[in-house]
Image (cartoon, grey):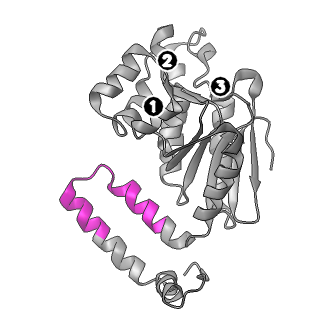
Amino acid sequence: MTGKLVRYAVDEAGAAFVTLDHPQSRNALGDALLDELLETLETARRDEAVRVVVLTSSHDRVFSSGGDLRGFADGRPPVAKYAELDRFPRLFKLIGALGKPVVCAANGDVLAGAFGLALACDLVIAKESARFGCPEINVGVFPFMISALIYRNVGRMRANELMMLGDLLTARQACELGLVNRVVPDEEFGDAVVSWAHRIAAKSPLLMRLGKDALDTTRDMGLHEALDTLQAQLALAFTTEDMSEGVLAFREKRSPRWRMR
């Protein structure tokens, strides 16, 4: 499936590649692209063949430049702008509730709102040449919406530095801060992304969904409440055939046959 701004393709292993495809704007996250991205992710969520989603870009140097600044300075009344600001929260929440792992394949610079998009994903793999950050303050904007995600992924003082100075991080620096899982030489990036996606796709889709749902639900809970919720989720996992099959396959030294039950 190919849209005007976002491409969607699923390979034989069950990896869905969602590609931001508006290089003319450096994949600026304008309303039209965000709407198409939301629709595409909903398609991946409903697609039973999909076991993992890879979010990437067709631009050779930029994953996404972030929000479309033209919309910030247009002449619409504030109430109209406010009404349309729900796209980023909806996108971040959808990724968390997708029921399938989402990998950000940062094949270029990840800037501003796109930095939040990457942090909303479950895993981030980056080209060595990619840069990360929120330079909005340099043009008189502040990263209001993505600050919630930055604060949940890095310490307060470092987060403030990123948002208040607007400096960019190299992929290696982002990895050292825990914002990126793996940095790959540019020439090895494509193969590394596919390898990761296929390794994830080989896991039990049912247990992966139960696990991701549990993580999304308990992330901001207090410890006692989180433990109670996770105990119930573990008890539910014990009732699945896939959990029994995984253990049996391990003992029999064979590949598991997932039944999604």
Number of other residues with Cα within 10 Å of mark 1, as a class: few under 14, some 14 to 19, many 20 or more: some
Residue 146: where, in percent of width, then height?
44, 30
For this view, does 132 lie left or right of residue 52? left
The residue that appears at 58% across and 24% down in the rendered structure is: 67
Q: Circle 3 sits on which residue?
A: 28
Q: Residue 60 falls in which quadrant of the image?
A: top right
Residue 28: where, in percent of width, then height?
65, 25
Say which of 211 and 189 sits in front. 189
How many numbered marks does the figure carry?
Answer: 3
Amino acid at pointer 1: Gln
Q: Which residues are magenta?
A: 209-230
Q: Earlier in the sequence, mark 2 or mark 1?
A: 2
Q: Circle 2 sits on which residue?
A: 135
Q: Are marks 3 and 2 in contact (CB under 8 Å)?
A: no
| Nearer to us: label 3 or label 1 | 1
| Nearer to us: label 2 or label 1 | 1
The residue that appears at 43% across and 17% down in the rendered structure is: 142
Number of other residues with Cα within 10 Å of mark 2, as a class: few under 14, some 14 to 19, many 20 or more: many
> Which numbered marker is on residue 173?
1
Residue 98: where, in percent of width, then height?
54, 55
Picture layout, residue 229 above or below residue 244: above
Q: Earlier in the sequence, mark 3 or mark 2?
A: 3
> Which numbered marker is on residue 15?
none
